[in-house]
Amino acid sequence: AIGVTGQRQGVVFVDGHGKELLTSPNVDLRAVFEGALLDEAYGPAIYRTCGHSPSLLLAPARLRWLAQNQSDTHKELRSLLTVPAWLTYRLTGVMACEPSLAAATGLLEISTRKRCYDLLEKLDLSSSLLPPLYNAGEVIGGLNSELANRWGLMPGTPVTLAGADTQCGLLGMGLASYGDVGIVAGWSCALQTVTKAPIYDDTMNSWVGCYPTQESWVFESNLGDIGNAHNWLKNALLGENAPWEMVNKAATIVPPGSNGILCYLGSGPRSATSSGLGRGGLLFPIPLRYQEPQAEQFIHASWENLAYSVKANLTTVQRITGSHNDTINLGGGMAQSNGLAQVVADILGRKIRLSKVSHVSVLGAARVAAVAAGTYTSIDEAAKSSSSEAVTLEPNLTNT
């Protein structure tokens, strides 16, 4: 079977013939003003219903932008799909969505895991644009013959929507129990804990989402585009062709404190609602004749920046959810550096269960696909099959 996952906030507008009118990925900020107006009028109601804020990231604001700026295109609009749902449609010809994806785009009532029709009506969003919901692991359709032949697969191979990429990352790390905490560190860095029921943040600074398992939710604190910033720093210091293996090896032997260098490239405890432009940078001892800073010291400092950001956000998550876990699960592209993972363990003062697989979201989607194929009877069972694919790092408390 095939499991489809993908970035959460992206949407695709489709006409009555299934043709794409406009794609709007997560980095599309054209609906800033429309989102601000929605938050001014309905902000608390949107958050309590959909669990997400600010509205500039959500589908209703992007739909308003489309209506006001490309009216001809808006008139042709017949369906609004998340990016993974659009991919599934291209594979099967069936339009569908899944709760964790619908929630992340502001198109779901978190508590019931159903469409929030009353709120959508207030936001001038027609429910006729929204496809039916399928649970992760349910077969939506079969792979069409053209793609099956191209890929060497059987026509009709079952296809399922596995869910949002971060949640699939947690599944790929084997998280299935309430209170499990996972960090998916890639282009961005999301910290989620699995909960038995939706838990809201009165300040609306954290997100509430659905987990692909039907009786679970997630509480999330998002650190922002830390992976993107980390990659920018490497490219700026050493060039795009510098191999990460060399960079990580050199940075790993830098001592705690990074020889006095401080890095402020992450979002720290800042929230989604205060996610506008801020200031960051690098600080290092001067005059340079006494100590000329090296590239690996800056990289190590960025690791410490990430670790302290995780610590601040983890404190918020545990305070609001009341959960405490001595072991933190870590996966994603950035987590493939053992040096970075050890810095996180040291600064948190906790064990880090580090995934051996870099593409944890892909692994999670594969687990859900295995449910659709009948290999497992539930997503919980499939997730726990990932438990052996990790190593545990103990914190070195002398390095905090």
Image (cartoon, rainbow, N blue to C red):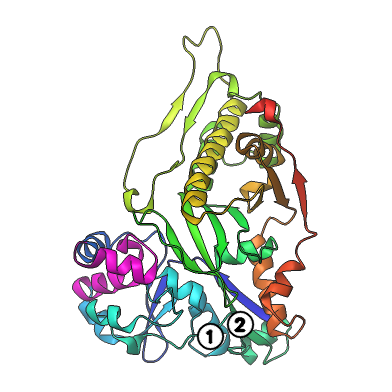
- Name the residue carrying label 2: 160
Residue 54 horizontal side relative to residue 169, left or right: left
Expressed as whole percent of the image width and height from the top left, the position of residue 289 reads: 52, 7
**Dot 2, crowdedness within 10 Å: few (<14), some or many (≥20)?**
many
Q: Main secondary structure of the magenta part?
A: helix
Residue at left 69%, top 66%? 363
The span picked out in magenta is: 40-69
Depth check: give the residue in front, 322 or 107: 322
Check if mark 1's residue and mark 2's residue have beta carbons within 8 Å.
yes
- Name the residue carrying label 1: 134
| SS under mark 1 | loop
Tag nearer the camera, 1 or 2 = 1
Q: Quadrant of the N terminus?
A: bottom right
On residue 164, the disc is none
Q: Quadrant of the C terminus?
A: top right
- As for residue 87 lying within the magenta part, the answer is no
**Dot 1, crowdedness within 10 Å: few (<14), some or many (≥20)?**
some
Residue at left 52%, top 64%? 218
Looking at this view, name the residue that lies furthest to the top. 290
- As for residue 64 lying within the magenta part, the answer is yes
How far apart, in angstroms, are the residues tagged by discs 1 and 2? 9 Å
Amino acid at circle 2: Thr
Residue at left 28%, top 64%? 44
Depth check: give the residue in front, 123 or 70: 123
